[in-house]
Amino acid sequence: MKKWFWTSLALCLAMPLWATDYLVETESFSEKGGWRVDQQFMDLMGSSYLIAHGMGKPVADAQTTIDINEKGTYGVWVRTFNWTAPWSKEEGPGAFQVKVNGKMLKSVLGTKGTTWGWQYAGTATLKKGTNTLALHDLKGFDGRCDALLLTTDKEPKLPDGIDEMEDFRRQHGTLPRQAADGGQFDLIVVGGGIGGMCAAVSAARLGLKVALVHDRHILGGNNSSEVRVHLGGKIEIGTYPALGRMLREFGHSKGGNAQPAAQYEDEKKTAFIAAEPNVRLFSCYRAIQVEMAGQDIKAVIVRHTENGDELRLTAPLFSDCTGDANLGFMAGADYRMGREGRDEFGESLAPEQADKLTMGASVQWYSVETDRQSHFPEFIYGLTFNEENCLDVKMGEWTWETGMNFDQIYDFERIRDYGMLVIYSNWSYLKNHFSGKSRYANRALDWVAYVAGKRESRRLLGDYILKQDDVDKHVFHEDASFAINWHFDLHFPDRVNTKHFPGQEFKAETKSNPIRVYDVPYRCLYSRNVDNLFMAGRNISTTHVTLGSTRLMRNIAMMGEVVGMAASICKKHQVKPRGVYQHHLPELKELMRKGTGKDASTLPDNQHFNEGDYILDGKNIERLKSIK
């Protein structure tokens, strides 16, 4: 009896009493290979993920190492998603497999399921010490992987949803228990697009210590080489023509949408921020949480989009330059989304009834002519093209616009994915079935965006909401600031596209509604209920109709410059943004008169326009020629 007891005890001690788990976040892989980090949907998923964006050609493996404390046989689970599921019941094209220590696990992943979830990849024998993991893409059609779980549990409890995943990540150490101190600043700017860059530098040049938080490696937002939208609008106009001069310091020297990456001159944007000693750039950090003190933001928690590190940044002033108004939303700022009804503000361009429609997001693309025939796979996933409805084109820019009837926040992955789906589907038809396919024999897709260029989502409400009447009647505002020259440019589904794809439109059109150059009130640039929050970008205080005029990136640059000036006055006089309007407006006007850009005589004139851009003066419209 005693011998049996000690034998049983020895066996129990030799066996683990609980399962051993290792959670690996794919965005933290040490070698990304041809896979890309996609952070666009962190607010919905809690983390970034890797995407195999090969435009129909398998990409190189992503690889990393993992240290195992206990050798054994582990089940491998993968969090992934069949991205074509909303449109097709077929197995999806985002196929990939997992390699462990160079050995391929049998299961093909990413082709099934209708939502993000865990799929079983197989079992692997892991040695104690260093082991290698790899993601092996099979088709190059945007397979995606969020995380891998290696476990000795035969029936593991797998988390689902953002809150469960958040807890699971913290339990397994891929997220910290508490954010580290990231420093104290005079102004924290969240969003490194054109508006955020100008807000940060304007404030810094006026003596403020500034944090600029941006969730990608590349600055510039829609003007970056990842999205490739040219700088529209016009600077140095209106009551304060010095505003916007700053943009000459880093704006691109050529115009054009959906052009080769070099044309967007990312290096100039990097140098522009790096040259400012008062600006600290937090690259690849996304704001995930705010701390409030009454009606003020006290601190913002930011998370690294690849390694999961978290920092707590504090300041008396903040500026939301995220486009989606993420910072303001987390802080409880009043906002609107969609179209106001015609009666609310008396806008003739508004619909009769309010609705949720927004302008959409563009996934741009282009092809190139090669010296040999090229193949493109059959790609049919719920969207069928034929001789009548196909688009006989070799590139697509702003008019390739999706998601107008979907929520640009909560449905955004679907919106982006549909943009890619239509490009691949149409291109596959042109290459393989079109009667004129000989003209495409030597053409190959050279670039398809996976970072979508968004036009509209949340608009934060300020002390003043800019409306159509302000523009039409050229209303005088004592706090006039930056000026706008752009017409009411409101996008809606293309009528021909609607005929062929009712309810599934992916092309847009617009109608020009002429204006005179007008000034926007400063009161549109700060929140009416979060007392220390500025905003600059497509999220400022406007109606849907006037957003069609204010949203271009040269306009946004001037917004940012004004925000930086106002922030300097806030610090000087210890007031909030509203206090600048109430008590220090003459001082803001003097700063706007001077501008914070460098001497114009030393700067290039990079105000280039495309065909379809307009300068509007009274009743005259001058269509400018394309700059190639």
Image (tube, grey):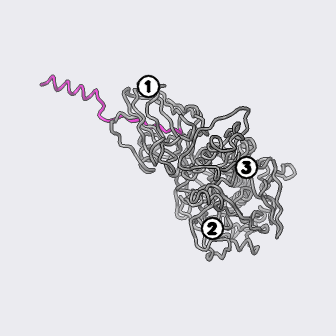
Q: Which label sits in the foreground, 3 or 2? A: 3
Which span of residues is magenta-colored? Answer: 1-27
Q: Which residue is mark 3?
A: 257
Question: Residue 195, image x and y in percent?
Answer: 69, 55
**Cα separation between marks 1 and 3:** 50 Å
Q: Which residue is mark 1?
A: 129
Q: Which residue is mark 2?
A: 462
Q: How many residues crowd around disc 3 within 10 Å: few (fewer than 14), some, or many (20 or more)?
A: some
Q: Earlier in the sequence, mark 1 or mark 3?
A: 1
Q: Residue furthest top?
A: 3
Whether residue 343 is situated above or below residue 187 in the rendered picture: below
Q: Which mark is residue 204?
A: none
Q: How many residues crowd around disc 2 within 10 Å: few (fewer than 14), some, or many (20 or more)?
A: many
Asked which secondary structure carries label 3, the reply is: loop
Q: Earlier in the sequence, mark 3 or mark 2?
A: 3
Marks counted in the figure total 3
Q: Earlier in the sequence, mark 2 or mark 1?
A: 1
Task: Return the residue nearer the eye: 527 or 628.
Answer: 628
Q: Residue at x 53, y 63 (%)?
A: 332
Image quarter (top left, top right, bottom left or bottom right) of the N terminus: top left
